[in-house]
Each structure stands twice: as structure tokens, then as C-alpha cells.
Image (spheres, coloured by chain):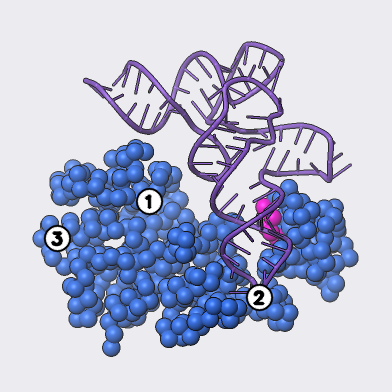
Chain colours: A blue, B purple
Amino acid sequence: MNSVFDILEERGYVEQLTHPEEIKELFKKESVPFYIGIDPTADSLHVGHFISLMVAAQMQRAGHKPIILVGGGTAVIGDPSGKTDMRKMLTLEDIDHNVECIKKQCEKFLSFEGENAARIVNNGDWLRDLNYLNFMREIGVHFSINRMLAAECYKNRLEQGLTFFELGYMLMQSYDFLYLHDHYGCKLQMGGNDQWSNIIGGVELIRKIGSDDAYGFTFKLLTTKEGKKMGKTEKGALWLDPEKTSPYEFYQYWRNVGDDDIEKVMKLLTFIPLDEIEELTKYKDERINEAKKRAAFEITKLIHGEEEALKAEEAANALFGGNGNIDNMPSIDVDDENISVVDALVLTEIAPSKGQAKTLVSQGSVSVNDKKIEDITYKLTDDFKDGYAILKKGKKVFYKLNLKK
RNA sequence: GGGUAGGUGGUCGAGUGGUUAAUGGCACCAGACUGUAAAUCUGGCGACGAGAGUCUACGAUGGUUCGAAUCCAUCCCUGCCCA
């Protein structure tokens, strides 16, 4: 039986480890409580967090105990890692709301029952009531500013200006680990590679205070071959919340990843066995599309469930393959058959404003029921055959308009 | 506290009285080519308006001017140097 470590390594998650040999041993011999932190800066998770959840899920499958830490306390500060500017501050109410939303999304991903049930904690529970003096005396003394400033993530901030407020982030994250270590027996902190220095902070803190069973593990960030972050779209981030990014859009995003990135995406974001991935991605021509279809389906299924994934797939088949069920494409009700193309584009959020809708139309990018529209004053009056019309932008964006009177 | 340099559109960054909705890069959208890919080339990229055009925008608030992102005043914020 492989240890999780091998699985994580084979699939390409592993980036850095604080104690490689010991961690490998640890995974083999016991069920390890580990934690992954998520900042509640929005009311939904996005693909950036997806990989964290995948790692947690892989770990849980192998029998380890996930602790998902939602940063309701640290979000008050904002993590400066990798940022060029100080993060916008959120109100406590926003943060608490976000924490609740994020909890719900995690619940879909991990099992909260059984021997190695996952647990969700909020560091606001212990950080918000911290006493500054005690904290400084017990925790602050263990941190060397010299060392912290040497860390890559703070280096460029030194030129821009870094406040103590932000520097304190590392102490708090380190304290989180200590807290979880002491209260839940947490031995391992996992996180994206941008968290490396914060993770080391915690590991070293625990070790200085006297325990030697603290480890750190970072995984790869989801980037394209060119090193750009994946998951950005016209509308911003690719959200896991179906209200913010529809399952169809979500499916399409993965269906359209670049050839160069599909293998990585499959390994990191699905549970498809490696030999199958290899089989699917061995082609370099259009046959690679089979891999993309599979990946898009599996990923959508993980996030939105099988039913939604099937619907998204069918909608895609209907639109691109000429067969399949058009009932499942994104749709919206309209109550006025005299709606103009421009208004329809805005209503469906295909275009963010009327001005942009007009440019699209005049550029010849828009069609209704496969008929190209170039007149920006065009009205859909005669297009609702059988009570619906299909509005299309470019080659890939479709919306079905249902006439409701 | 003193000195000094700054705060520009999604982002980075030009612009220092009118022809500036504001050069350019990146991001993003579309067209061509294709495999719902990449690369490349072309076009677009504040809002409203069918259009002429109107409005909103260059940290905030006032002011000077026929006219301000650009000048002045006050305030807020940031960097750097000195204390």
C-alpha cells in the first residue's frame, strides 16, 4: 500500500517539506491530524482554494485527519505574502459571514464522520480575545525580526513599506499552528507554496517551545505553463459557488484549458488514476480534447455534483457537438418578446454594460438562433420559436432565453 | 515632529492648464486561423444614448480660470531621509 506521500508526489502536489524523511515516516505509521488554512476574504472559495481542498481530501482518504482552519481572526489583518499592497480591510461582520459560507463549501468536500472526521475551526475563536502582553511575552520572544525580514515574501515589501500590523500575520499564523498542536494534536501544516515562510514560523515556534512533532508541507500553486495563476476569467475569479460562477461556466473553463496544462489539471484537481491520465493525455493533436472533456466533467462533478456536471456536459454537447439536450444550457426568463439584442446581452450578463453589448454586436460577435446580428437596434420579436431563443456571443458563450408571459 | 517624493482607469505606469475618456504594457473580450487548445495577426476595452451627444472619472474637499488629472489652499494616505 502506498503512503499518501507517494500519491501526493506522483500527482505533483509536493513543493517543499520541512522534514522530508520524518514526514514520510509519519504518514506511514499513524493517522496524522493536519491543518490547512483558508482566509475568508470573500463569501466563496475559488479555484485557488480548490487545490487545498484536494490535498485535504487526498489526505483524508489515506486516513489522516483534516482540520480546516478558517481565518476569521487573521483575516482582520490580511496576509501580506505575495501581495504588493496591503490588503483591503474587511469588517468583522463581513468576515463572519464569509466564514459561514466557506464552511458550507468545505463540507461538500470532506467527510465529517468516522474515525478521521474532518473538523472546521475558526481562528477568530482564539485570536480575537488574545491578550497582547501575554502574546508578546509567550510568542513574540521566539521570533527574530532579522530572520523574518530575510524571507522572500517580506523582501519586496520592504521597498514598498511594511507595517508591523502585517508583519504580525506570521506570528498569528504560527500561533494558530501552536494552538491546534496543543488542542487537537495537529502535527502538520499544509499550504500553498506562498505560505512557506508562515508555515516554517509555526513549525519553529512549536519546536522552540519544546515539542518536536511539528512539520510543514507546501504544495504547488495552480499556475499555467507560463506561470500565470489559473482560474481568472472575464468576471474575475472562478468561484466554487454556483451563484457566482455557474456550473456550466465552470465546466467550460476546464474544457478550455491549454493543452500544456491539461495533464497538470487532471493530476491536481481530479481523482482520476494516473495511468488513465497518462492514456488520455498522450496525444498532442485534437485527441487531447477527450482528456479535457473528462477533466471538465470530473472537476465539475467534484464541486457541483454529478447531476450538475452532466447538465453542463449535455449543454456543451448541444452547443458544440450539435446534439444533446439544450434544456441544460444556462437560461434566463424574459417577459418581453420585443427585447433588443443589446438588452438581452446585458440581462444575461454576457455583456457587462450596454456599451459593451453594442460593440460586440457591431463587431459581428453576436448571433440569435445561429443568425448573425449586426444591427444594434435589432429586436428579438420573431425569434422566440417554441417559446425560446438562443443568444450566442462568439463561439463559446451561449444563453437560452425563455419567453415567459 | 522636520525635510522630501508620491497618490491616475481591472492592474502596472505615462501625462504637468485646452485637440485628454486620458500614451503604452499586462489582464480581459471579439474577429481571422484552429481542435471549444496554444502561438500569431487584427479590432475592442468608463457609463448612458439609434445617433449627434450627454454624464461620470485622475486620493478628498474647496478655490483660481472661459477651460484643471495638470495651478492654489486645506485635509487624508504612502514611500524615503532626519529626529
Residue bearing mark 1: A82
Compared across the picture, whether B48 is left or right of A115 comes to: right
User: How far apart are the two marked residues, 2 and 1, measured between alpha carbons?
Assistant: 37 Å
Q: Main secondary structure of the magenta part?
A: loop
Compared across the picture, whether A30 is left or right of A256 comes to: left
Q: Earlier in the sequence, mark 3 or mark 2?
A: 3
Mark 3 on the same chain as mark 2: yes
Residue bearing mark 2: A316
Give the image location of residue A116, x and y in percent.
30, 78
> Does the segment drawn in magenta span residue A349?
yes
Residue bearing mark 3: A207
Compared across the picture, whether A63 is left or right of B39 comes to: left
User: How far apart are the two marked residues, 3 and 1, measured between alpha carbons?
Assistant: 26 Å
Q: Name which residue lies at 82% across and 63% down.
A: A372
Q: Residues within 10 Å of mark 2 (few under 14, many from 20)?
A: many
Q: Which residues are magenta?
A: A348-352
Parent chain of label 2: A
Q: Height in image: A342 above or below A67?
A: above
Q: Name which residue lies at 84% across and 62% down.
A: A380
Q: Name which residue lies at 83% across and 57% down.
A: A374
* Amino acid type, callout 2: Ala
Q: Which labelled disc corresponds to residue A315?
A: none
